[in-house]
Each structure stands twice: as C-alpha cells, then as structure tokens.
C-alpha cells in the first residue's frame, strides 16, 4: 500500500518573497530613412549626429509592465538628413510582492538599463547595414534621467498634467 502525503507539492512558490522577472525582451519598432540619397552620399563632410532617448511605461496587469526605450538617431550633412533611424526596444517585466514605492524607480532605472544594450546593438547594426559607419550610442545614466524627470514633474505640478511627452525626451550629444 502506498502512502499519500497531504503536504503541498514541491516547486509551487507560495512565498511572499519579492521577485523581479524579465518575461521577454523584443524589438518593437525599427525604421531607417535615407531621404536625400543618393545625392547626399556624394557630399564629403563629417555628419552631425543627434540622439534622442525616451522611456515609456505601460501597465499590462497589476504586476506586469511593458517598458519601451525609444531612440531617434539623426545624421545630417550640410544641413540635410543623411539618415534617420528610429528604434523602440521593449521588455515585459514582472514585479511580484515588491512595494509600489520601489516599483516606479525600477521601471524608470532598472528596466531601461536592461533594455539599453539591445537598443544600442540594433541601432548600430541598422546603421551599418545601411552602408554607414556604425554609431555606438554612449552609456546613459538612467538614474540621473529618472531623477531629472522627477524634478520636472514636481516643478510642473498638478497644473501641467497634460504636458506633452516630447518635453520629457532626453537629447544626448554625440
């Protein structure tokens, strides 16, 4: 006769320990434009490069969030666009038993820090495949970016709740 136990099945995690999980990382959007080709390719001048970075957070459920890291890289020669790359790298992150006060900084600092190397690689690869020298984006201090956004939100106050998302974009020198 076999003895059956009423003990809970092993492997089931009923603990209240905090947990942070990466569910998925994916390239959500990618675009390359060369609006002035082929004429602009004959101009012998160093391009001026502008990089914009933005972070967006969308709740999927109470414990799951999508974080998107968007970048626009624009290279100009003689005032005309040589190329423009727009990319959006996203990830789905799960927060279990993490206090709400800790989730916001993780969404604004930790998640973008995880996504950024993927975004950098995709942008460099796209620029290279377009026939140009790849541009390797500089490291970003997402903690500083998060703190800057908190200060902007506090200064704007409740009177500016409908502020444009464009105001929060960070433009990096390159």
Image (cartoon, helix red, strand yellow):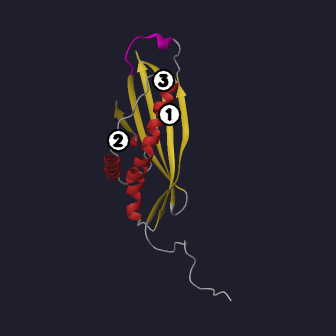
Label 3 neighbour load within 10 Å: few <14, some 14-19, many 20+: many
In the image, residue 30 lies at what x, y percent? Answer: 54, 35
Q: Is residue 164 visible?
A: no
Instruction: Tell me the quarter of the image containing the N terminus.
Output: bottom right
Q: Which residues are magenta?
A: 39-47
- Identify the mark at residue 86; answer none if there is no mark: 1
Label 2 neighbour load within 10 Å: few <14, some 14-19, many 20+: few
Q: Residue at x 46, y 36 (%)?
A: 121
The single residue placed furthest to the bottom in the displayed view is 1
125 relative to 143, above or below: above
In front: mark 2 or mark 1?
Answer: 2
Q: Give whichever of discs 2 and 1 has the lower sequence position.
A: 1
Disc 2 + disc 3, Cβ < 8 Å: no
Is disc 2 placed on a helix, strand or loop?
A: loop
State the residue position of label 2.
Answer: 140
In the image, residue 14 lies at what x, y percent? Answer: 51, 74
Instruction: Tell me the quarter of the image containing the C terminus.
Output: top left
State the residue position of label 3.
Answer: 83
In-front residue for pair 167/38: 38
Asked if residue 37 is among those painted magenta in the image, a careful observer would answer no
């Amino acid at each position: 006769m076999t003895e059956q136990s009423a003990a809970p099945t092993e492997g089931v995690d009923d603990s209240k320990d905090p947990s942070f999980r990466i569910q998925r990382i994916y390239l959500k959007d990618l675009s390359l434009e060369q609006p002035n080709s082929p004429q602009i390719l004959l101009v012998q001048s160093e391009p001026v490069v502008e990089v914009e970075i933005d972070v967006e957070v969308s709740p999927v459920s109470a414990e799951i969030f999508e974080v998107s890291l968007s970048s626009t890289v624009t290279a100009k020669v003689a005032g005309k666009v040589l190329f423009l790359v727009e990319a959006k790298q996203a990830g789905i992150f799960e927060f279990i038993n993490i206090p709400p006060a800790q989730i916001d900084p993780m969404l604004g600092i930790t998640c973008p820090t995880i996504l950024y190397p993927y975004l950098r690689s995709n942008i460099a690869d796209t620029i290279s495949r377009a026939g140009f020298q790849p541009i390797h984006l500089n490291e970003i201090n997402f903690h500083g970016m998060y703190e800057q956004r908190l200060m902007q939100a506090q200064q704007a106050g409740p009177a500016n709740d409908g502020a444009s998302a464009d105001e929060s974009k960070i433009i990096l020198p390159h």
